[in-house]
Image (cartoon, rainbow, N blue to C red):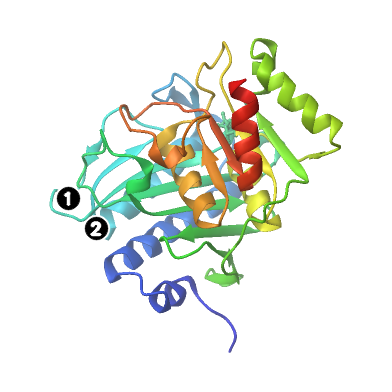
Amino acid sequence: MSRISLNNHLYESGVSDELRHLINDISRAGKYIHNAIRTTDLGLAGSSNTFGEEQLKLDVLSNDIVKEELKESRLVCCYASEEESSEMTELLSDAPFTVVFDPLDGSSLLDCNLAIGSIFGIYESKGKLMGKTPRDQVAALYLVYGPRTILVYSTGKGVHAFYLNEVGEFTLLEKNLTMKDEVKTYAPGNLRAVVDTPSYRTMMNLWLDEGLTLRYSGGMVPDIHHMLIKGAGIFTNIGGSKYPKGKLRLLYECGPFAYIMEQAGGASSDGTKSVLDVEITDLDQRTPIITGAKKEVKRVSKVLNE
Ligand code: AFP
């Protein structure tokens, strides 16, 4: 039998039992979210998140689903969610992990039926994240909900992808996703910043002149997943006047993806250093991000700093 389940892959990779159980529990949340996307109406919930953004019923439901699984796991001391208040919530004080997550990233793309995702970062620190960096994560994973639902995880031993099969099990799709030092596609986020950030316009013009192909959906999860599957590409979301540090959050979006991208042999940068080395000072903090093929991340950082 050639089928390899997520649980078996974690086990065979020597991941600790506790972390394996937690990742399995998070993957179960992903299955419920997968189902909710297909069955819940797309209306507004009548509430807004920490950032004042209106929440869809699905944003609220996905958040509840994740919280439920984290609680049931009895392995999570504390969590912080992009959909909740700017404080950590304690679940079980002596449990080993802290989980940060964006339960439904890209939900503004839902009504157009584009791919969206969930993002998770796992820390061992019991709730104290201030002063730490995303390099302290012990695992990161994401789920992309597209024509297929795919889960990608890393526990620091490579990056591995699983698809949700017809009987509801995550089954190995590809192990050791690897970034080549090659850039055929670019995914330039927060592009409105070219208006007042001339160096970003310079970078865009370079890509246009070099004949690169645009691959940008507006969903961080599918846009970065595209690069990891193709093993090439560059993704940016950098600052301008509307979002001085770019649009994306360190804890919930950039940190987990930086961990996964660097594990796949790619790079991440906030313009000067790896996103994995950006100090966490606030749960809501944003950071510029340049991530993808190593050499290109270096070149983009240089152009943006000129
Ligand atoms: P929504 O969750 O509001 O749809 O935003 C998605 C997102 O946070 C991220 O997934 C994208 O990479 C980014 O926004 C797109 O940003 P720009 O609109 O600035 O390109």
Q: In the rendered image, which quarter contains the C terminus?
A: top right
Q: Is residue 97 above or below residue 302?
A: below
Q: Position of residue 3 (x, y in %)?
A: 57, 81
> How many numbered discs?
2
Crowd tier of the residue under label 2, counting other residues whose Cα lies within 10 Å: few below 14, some 14–19, many 20 or above = many
Query: Camera-side residue: 13 or 118?
Result: 13
Query: Which residue is disc 2 drawn over?
Result: 75
Specify whether 42 is left or right of 133: right
Q: Are marks 1 and 2 in contact (CB under 8 Å)?
A: yes
Q: Position of residue 198 (x, y in %)?
A: 68, 14
Query: Which residue is disc 1 drawn over?
Result: 92
Crowd tier of the residue under label 1, counting other residues whose Cα lies within 10 Å: few below 14, some 14–19, many 20 or above = some
Residue farthest toward the left in the current orientation of the protein? 94
Q: Quadrant of residue 175?
A: bottom right
Judged from the image, the secondary structure of the residue bearing numbered disc 2 is loop
Amino acid type, mark 2: Leu
Specify whether 167 is left or right of 26: right
Residue drawn at 49 percent across, 30 percent down: 272
Specify whether 301 is left or right of 206: left
Q: Is residue 8 above or below residue 49?
A: below
Residue drawn at 57 percent across, 10 percent down: 241
Amino acid type, mark 1: Leu
Query: Camera-side residue: 283 or 116?
Result: 283
Name the quadrant where ligand 1 sits: top right
Examine the rendering and report whether any part of residue 216 can be seen.
Answer: no
Residue drawn at 46 percent across, 49 percent down: 259
Q: In the rendered image, which quarter contains the N terminus?
A: bottom right
Mark 1 or mark 2: which comes first in sequence? 2
Examine the rendering and report whether any part of residue 247 can be seen.
Answer: yes
Q: Position of residue 290 (x, y in %)?
A: 58, 35
